[in-house]
Amino acid sequence: MSQVIRMGIVGAGNIFRAAHVKTLLEHPEVELVAVCDINPERAEAVAAEYGISSFYTDYRELLKRDDIDAVDICTSNLFHSEISIAALQAGKHVFCEKPDAVNPEEAQKMADAAKASGKVLMTMRNNRFNPSSQYLKRFIEEGHMGEMYTGRCGWLRRRGIPGKGGWFTTKELSGGGPLIDLGVHYIDLTMWLMGNPKPVSVSGATYTKFANNEIADSVHSSFGEKKADGTFDVEDLATGFIRFENGATLQIEFSWASNVGEEMTFIEIRGTKAGFSLKKGELQIFSESAGQLTNMAPVFKGTPPSAHGEHLKHFIDVVQKRAEPIILPEHGVDMIKILSAIYKSAETGREVIL
Ligand SMILES: NC(=O)c1ccc[n+]([C@@H]2O[C@H](COP(=O)([O-])OP(=O)(O)OC[C@H]3O[C@@H](n4cnc5c(N)ncnc54)[C@H](O)[C@@H]3O)[C@@H](O)[C@H]2O)c1
């Protein structure tokens, strides 16, 4: 019989309510025992709404409790590393929302703290848990793609800036705009499917052209608290090119706002035996057989479970030692190194060697 994992939540905003709380409340091996938010009304309201017995406004108070085994961190980006490190040092397992940290030094400190503590540190990579991603991983591992030598990925929004003026658009609190916010999802998924090749250099460019635009056409622009007279010192579009040690390459493009036809997520990987395109969740695989070119579209039946929920369940499986983690702290360090180097390349106009 597995032990019950007593969990504390730090940061009870949009993503915790939208994508974490249901899975955690329903999980038979999880008990939510405390919630912390710097906004006292929110901490109290969330505790009352979900029947969580204690609430705090300072995460250090929550971490002092010996009866808490794990924490789930859903704060704005800047605080992910500080709270993760403090939690690991207090002997807690840590699940943390993406991005891992706002710079590579902090991401490395998180990985080091996890190693020193012997506890699990996992950051959210929900897209790895979509049925199409799981299918592709298996398709690739069965050898159907051959050598994967190049790819493209991106998430383009037409008008979908989250929390305009608030923490999302304030570099100090977020680490950047769509590159760090959205890039972490799709660069991670593409690299994972490519077998986590080691990045060796990047080149990138960033633009801010829509800071004064008030139109919104994306559900994502309702995320995060807006601030009328707030800050907008991040990019709204980023492009880039990543080279890997094995010779493979990846082109990337992420926008919160740009003049495109419609919001679009996409990943393409080209292999010597097959290639695929995953556009807005629609998967097509391109290959050849019996002397003809073939297109294949796998059929996924039923309503898929929440990918965020599936990742949280994987975290619990790893804490309970019945699964090996598919997301490692080193993946986060590599990811934040890539993103930070793209920002540096955008600033200097030169390729950055990692
Ligand atoms: N995986 C995904 O699909 C996904 C989607 C949206 C957001 N996110 C990530 O989730 C995180 C939160 O985003 P959100 O949209 O919920 O933002 P939000 O602003 O709605 O919520 C953040 C909450 O954290 C609280 N907070 C901030 N600093 C804190 C601290 N030091 N201690 C305790 N509480 C603190 C805020 O008061 C707020 O309630 C971000 O890192 C974001 O990148 C992930």
Image: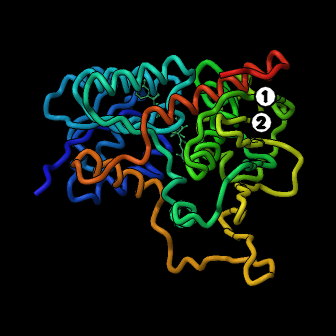
Q: Label 1 amino acid?
A: Ser
Disc 2 element: strand
Residue found farthest to the left:
1
Q: Residue at x 65, y 22 (%)?
A: 354
Q: Residue at x 31, y 52 (%)?
A: 24
Residue closer to the observer: 212 or 259: 259
Taking 230 as reference, is 193 above or below it?
below
The numbered mark, 2 or 1, whose residue comes first in the sequence reads: 1
Residue closer to the observer: 337 or 164: 337
Q: Label 2 amino acid?
A: Phe
82 relative position to 297: left or right? left
Q: Quadrant of the N terminus?
A: bottom left
Residue closer to the observer: 29 or 267: 267
Q: Position of residue 294 (x, y in %)?
A: 76, 78
Q: Residue at x 37, y 27 (%)?
A: 84
Q: Quadrant of residue 197?
A: top right
Assess whether mark 1 and mark 2 are in contact (beta carbons under 8 angstroms).
Answer: yes
Q: Which mark is residue 203?
A: 1
Disc 2 target residue: 241
Q: What distance separates the C-alpha of mark 2 from that of mark 1?
A: 5 Å
Q: Position of residue 40 (x, y in %)?
A: 37, 29
Residue found farthest to the bottom:
290
146 relative position to 83: left or right? right
Q: Residue at x 74, y 21 (%)?
A: 352
